[in-house]
Image (cartoon, rainbow, N blue to C red):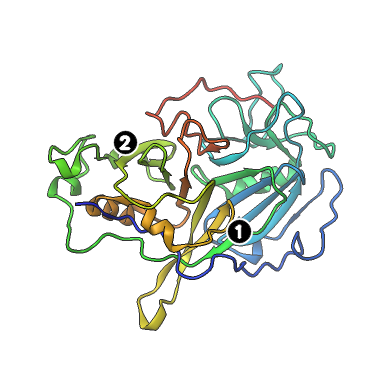
Amino acid sequence: MAGAFAFGFAGTAAAQPADPVPLPGTAPLQLLPGEYLWLPELSPRGPVLVLVSLPEQRAYVYRNGVRIGVATVSTGKPGFETPTGVFTILQKKREHFSNLYDDAPMPFMQRLTWDGIALHAGRVPGYPASHGCVRLPYAFSELLYGVTAHGITVVISDQPGQAPLLAEPGVFAHPPAAPAPAVLATPIASHRLPTPAWEGHEWAPERAPPGALSVLVSRADRRLVVLREGIEIGRAPLGAGEPLPDGTRAFQLLEGAVPGRDGASSRRRWVQVLGEPVADPAALARAVVVAPAFAALVDEALAPGATVVLTDQPLRATPVTVLDAQGAAADAIQAPSSVGD
């Protein structure tokens, strides 16, 4: 019997977190090419999110929902455009040289895709000038390198930079009356359960090392895929539910909790980091339907830094990259390990 995966929002998602850095939304911050602002003391701990705005040629850094830094950047020039979408850091190297463009130095390289897109230090002239990578001021790239980790979320947008939207989550759990079969509680090799209710479900957390979890939900594919460190560890077919809203939306789980309503237990803190605010937040919970025991496994695995991406498009055909899903989410296919500039 299918049950609601229930990733939803109670109330509005339009409120923004307190943001002491005077950036877009208040007074414009004037930065010359190569300049940056770095204030990590504003939020000393929590999951890190990097948001790159192509039209602004800016990179914004958030830690636990609070903006701690901003820098000028240089993204892909015409013919080598930087792809938009939701990515995860797949690899980090302090010293790296391009194996595509004449061994060009790429200090503090943080890989976003297996086909050549990365964050790294480089020349920032004030306009798009790279071969697709996101160039950062050298000192800023070193500071950023020091606070990021494998698996953190990087959003590249073709919209002006905006602070992530605070989102109060609804229930993100399984119905207690439907416990998982005992076999699912054991970290064994990848498996498919033989019963009809579990047909097409897989859960194999031993495939990937510890790290940030990414949950991809495609209404068009009628599929939910769970990744960790870019490696698929679970999947489930979607049951009957309401259509997802148009477009692609991404959410990140923060540290801490918000009080429940009417004396209810506390709830997780989420921010929406990509996409238009949802007109009917509760519709998200009604749109994502999987077997209750599988929902329980995902719920148990969630930790601060986890990302949930919801899209009405097929994972292979979204107009934006979804966590490098062309490779990782679609049967864990990785392209050659090359990085450009």
Q: Which mark is residue 330?
A: none
Q: Secondary structure at mark 1?
A: loop
**Residue neighbourhood size for the residue with mark 2, other residues' Cα within 10 Å, grouped as few (<14), some (14–19), many (≥20):** some
Q: Secondary structure at mark 2?
A: helix
**Residue annotated with mark 1:** 164
Amino acid type shown at disc 2? Arg
**Left or right placement of residue 173 versus residue 119 in this view:** left
**Residue annotated with mark 2:** 207
Nearer-the-camera pick, 78 or 333: 78
Whole-percent x and y of residue 66? 62, 63
Nearer-the-camera pick, 59 or 93: 59
The residue at 65%/53% (across/down) is 61
Whole-percent x and y of residue 160? 72, 50
Amino acid type shown at disc 1? Pro
Quadrant of residue 63 within the rendered picture:
bottom right
Nearer-the-camera pick, 157 or 185: 157
